[in-house]
Structures are given as C-alpha cells and as structure tokens.
Image (cartoon, grey):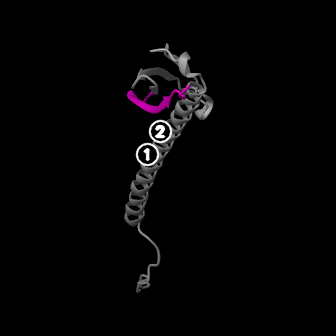
C-alpha cells in the first residue's frame, strides 16, 4: 500500500517565521514609542518656554508703564504660576533696573524655571529714557 504524497505547496508561515516577524514588529513599535516620548518632551519644553516668554513680556510691559522717576534699583523676586498643562509649573520672576546715564535706564525681567532637573531662564531687556523737560 502506498502512502499519499505530501502536499508540496505548503502555503502559509511556519512558527519560526511568525516569531521572527513578531520580534521585528515589537522592535519597530518600541522605537516608535521612544520617538513619541521624545517628541512629547520637546513639545512640553517649548510650551514652558513660550509661557516664560509671555510672563517676561507681561512684567516688562508693567515696568515700562511706570513713570521714569518711580523705578527702583531692584525689586523683590516672586513666583508666578503656569497655564501649561494644568499649571503645575512655577516660574520665578526677577525684575531689576540699572542706570545707563542721567536720563536712561536699563530694565530687565528674568524668568526662571526648572524642567527635568535642568534650570532654564528667559531674560527680557528694554531701555527707557526720560523725556526732556
């Protein structure tokens, strides 16, 4: 009695081929997840920097709105809240002025914050002059 011939056209994948394909897909997915994490971190850091620029401009405009004679040599620093992702971040705002001449002052606003144990700062400067009387 003769055995029937085995099928020579075995369409499909072997278990080894499936496992190799699965490992390749997992490695690709881990790489994509890593890239997404890095992109989110950069996005958050940029949002925090934009908030610091906004705060610096806001407090600089407050300083520039004062009369020339009311500027003092230094101001106390204070904490400002954040509107970025729920407002958990705290910024430190430092304002100062320095005379550049008899009728000119340099105004400085420095906004500092920490992101992932790294200190960042944004400084806004402007000069104001007293109108000749």
Residue, x 47% and y 21% (percent of image)?
94
The one nearer the camera, 5 or 49, is 49
In the rendered image, the residue lying farthest to the front is 133
**The label number, if any, that marks residue 45 in the structure image:** 2
The one nearer the camera, 54 or 69, is 69
Q: Main secondary structure of the magenta part?
A: strand
Residue 55 colored magenta? no
Disc 2 on helix, strand or loop?
helix
Closer mark to the observer between disc 1 and disc 2? 2
Residue, x 44% and y 70% (percent of image)?
13
Q: How far apart are marks 1 and 2 (CA)?
A: 11 Å
**The label number, if any, that marks residue 66 in the structure image:** none
Disc 1 on helix, strand or loop?
helix
Tell me where residue 7 appears, x and y as whole percent.
Answer: 44, 82
Which residue position holds label 1?
A: 38
Counting residues from the N terminus, which is met first, the one under dot 1 or under dot 2?
1
Residue 113 colored magenta? yes
Residue, x 58% and y 34% (percent of image)?
84
Q: What stretch is highlighted in magenta?
A: 109-133
């Amino acid at each position: 009695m003769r055995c029937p011939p085995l099928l020579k056209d075995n369409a499909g994948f072997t278990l080894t081929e499936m496992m190799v394909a699965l490992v390749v897909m997992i490695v690709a997915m881990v790489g994509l997840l890593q890239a997404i994490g890095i992109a989110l971190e950069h996005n958050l850091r940029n949002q925090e920097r934009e908030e610091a620029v906004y705060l610096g401009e806001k407090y600089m405009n407050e300083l520039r709105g004062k009369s020339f004679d009311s500027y003092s040599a230094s101001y106390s620093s204070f904490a400002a809240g954040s509107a970025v992702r729920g407002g958990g971040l705290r910024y430190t705002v430092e304002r100062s002025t320095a005379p550049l001449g008899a009728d000119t002052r340099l105004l400085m606003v420095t906004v500092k914050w920490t992101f992932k144990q790294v200190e960042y700062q944004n400084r806004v400067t402007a000069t104001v002059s007293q109108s000749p009387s």
